[in-house]
Structure formats: C-alpha cells, structure tokens
Image: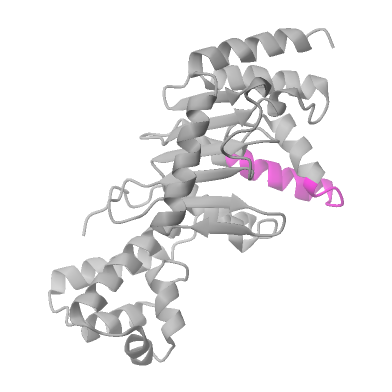
C-alpha cells in the first residue's frame, strides 16, 4: 500500500498514517465478514476500540495489528510487513508532541491533519488564521485566550503557531485558501501597530503561489456561513475523506461523514462567490492598510 508521504518527513505526523491504516483494516475486516465485536474480542478489547482504530483516532499496538491481520486472513507476507511498518510509523510522535504541556489532545489531532493535508480551506470571522499570523499578532491572540498563563507558556504557544507556518514553504506545500470576514481586517488585536503589521504580512502571503485570500465585505450583509468559523481539510491519499474542523472554546468537532462535509463545502463555495475575488481582496487589503496608517 503506497502513500504520498516520505518516511522521516519532519512536517508530517502520525495522524493521517493512523487514518490510512485504520481504513485498510476496516476494508479487510468487511471483506472477511468479521464484526467489530469479534475483532475486538480477538485483540482482548471492545467493539468501540475497533471503531476508534478504524477511524485512526487511537494509536496502534503492533501485536494487535498482527492479530487482526491473521483474523482477516491476510497471508501475503509482503503486505503484512508493509502494514506492520505503517503501524510502527503511525506511533512516531509529530513535532507538536514536544509542546504537549501547552496543547490539548484535541488540538494535537488537528495539527496532525493540517501537516498532512494537500488543501486547507478556512473561514474566519474574528482572527487571521494561525497559518498566516505574525508573531506579534499571534501573541496577542494567545494572551486573549490564556491571559493567566506565564510568559514562558505564552511564548511556547506562539512558537507552535510559528512552527506550523513552515508547511507553507516546505517542499510540496498544501494549498491554503482562506476566506475572511471584513471584521478581521478592522479589529485591532494587539493594537493598531500590530494590526497594521498583520495586514502587511497578509499582503505578502498573497504572493505565495499556494495561498489564496478572499474577504467577505460588510456590504454583503448576512451570508452562508453565519454559524461561525470552520476549516475543511483534504488529503492526497484517495482513501481518506475530507475532514471539517470546528473549534470550540474547550474542544473541537471533527466531521468526516459525507453529508456533514458536503454541507460545509457548499457553504465554503458560496462564501467564495460572495467574497471579493483574490485580486480584489489585495486591493481591499491595501486600501484598508492605507486607511489605518493614519491611526
């Protein structure tokens, strides 16, 4: 089973590898006609554990994978070894694990998806997305959410955002398509100097061939994504579905059912139609920045 990821890729992580292995195990189980309950019994666990494994939401013990492959009748030695190697790789920590003291598990899962995506589409109503934030703007956003944190913890959280941004200029980077509500351009997060610096950085980001920015102007009024910010991630592996990420105050939703994803993709498509085009957005950013220069 081939994947598009090179072993040792410093930007990738275990999340998508677990999803790939889980999807492969599910296909093998279904082809053999084995129930999740029976599969769970085979590895001394439960039906829910098999479900989580097949969704790639837990780590894999090599012994469990080996036992499942035997149960599913996979006797191709070369294929077995590829899948067992994938199980080992899927347990390799991503770069973000060294920030585990300041990152909740639910967000570490997102970082794994983000690092592995080929297309990231995001709609934001309050902040510039983390992938496009300046260090000063990122620090101001972190302080808003973690005002009681120590200066060291705040800097570690900021460093996570700065490290994430390396994927924009790595080899074979993802395409990033961002739609912003105009309010993002007007809200002085961190003060007017910080906002001006952020707008300049946004203008620079639009020069990257893999980054597209659009703004939904105030004049549009209500629009198709009135429910709030969300992201849609697509992966190069054909086996993997798109994932919708909706962040909440203390947790996040990860949606991968086709009907749910289609609703969000349609909302994103409508937003892109309602928004200024990328070239018009550059003009709007430039105009807004010149307006703010006098403040």
Q: Eyeballing the image, is 264 above or below 251?
A: above
Q: Main secondary structure of the magenta part?
A: helix
Residue 146 percent location from the top left of the image: 80, 49
> As rendered, which of 237 and 149 lies closer to the eye?
237
Instruction: Identify which residue, 6 or 145, lies in the foreground.
Output: 145
Tell me if I can see residue 5 in this picture: yes
Image position of 158 (left or right of 89): right
| Rendered view: 197 above or below 36 | above
| Residue 245 position within the rendered picture, expressed as x and y whole percent measured from the top left | 54, 51
- x, y (%) of residue 91? 43, 66
Residue found 26% across the figure and 85% down from its top? 34
For the point 78% across and 47% down, the residue is: 145
> Is 153 covered by the magenta stretch?
yes
Question: What segment carries the magenta color?
Answer: 145-163
Q: Is residue 31 above or below residue 9?
A: below
Q: Residue at x 32, y 90 (%)?
A: 38
Q: Image quadrant of residue 266? A: top left
- The colour style of the image is one colour
Name the image quarter holding the C terminus: top right
> Would you identify the image quadrant in which residue 218 lies?
top right
Question: What residue is at 22 percent from the left and 84 percent from the top?
Answer: 70
Quadrant in the picture for the N terminus: bottom left
């Amino acid at each position: 089973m081939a994947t598009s990821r090179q072993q040792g890729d410093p930007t990738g992580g275990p999340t998508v590898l677990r999803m790939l292995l889980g999807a492969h195990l599910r296909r093998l189980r279904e082809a053999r006609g084995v129930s999740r309950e029976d599969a769970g019994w085979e590895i001394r666990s439960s039906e829910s554990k098999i479900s989580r494994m097949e969704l790639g939401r837990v780590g894999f013990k090599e012994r469990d994978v080996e036992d499942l492959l035997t149960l599913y009748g996979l006797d191709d030695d070369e294929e077995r070894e590829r899948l067992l190697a994938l199980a080992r790789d899927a347990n390799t920590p991503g770069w973000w694990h060294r920030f585990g003291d300041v990152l909740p598990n639910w967000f570490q899962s997102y970082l794994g998806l983000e690092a592995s995506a080929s297309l990231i589409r995001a709609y934001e109503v309050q902040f510039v997305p983390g992938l496009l934030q300046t260090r000063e703007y990122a620090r101001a956003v972190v302080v808003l959410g973690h005002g009681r944190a120590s200066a060291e913890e705040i800097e570690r959280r900021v460093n996570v955002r700065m490290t994430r941004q390396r994927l924009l200029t790595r080899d074979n980077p993802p395409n990033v398509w961002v739609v912003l509500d105009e309010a993002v351009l007007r809200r002085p997060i961190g003060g007017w100097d910080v906002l001006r610096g952020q707008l300049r950085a946004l203008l620079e980001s639009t020069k990257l061939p893999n980054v597209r920015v659009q703004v939904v102007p105030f004049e549009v009024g209500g629009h198709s994504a009135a429910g709030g910010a969300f992201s849609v991630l697509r992966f190069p592996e054909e086996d993997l579905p798109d994932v919708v990420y909706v962040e909440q105050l203390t947790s996040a939703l990860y949606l991968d059912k086709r009907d749910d994803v289609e609703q969000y993709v349609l909302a994103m498509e409508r937003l892109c139609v309602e928004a200024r085009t990328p070239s018009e957005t550059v003009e709007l950013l430039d105009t807004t920045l010149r307006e703010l220069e006098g403040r």
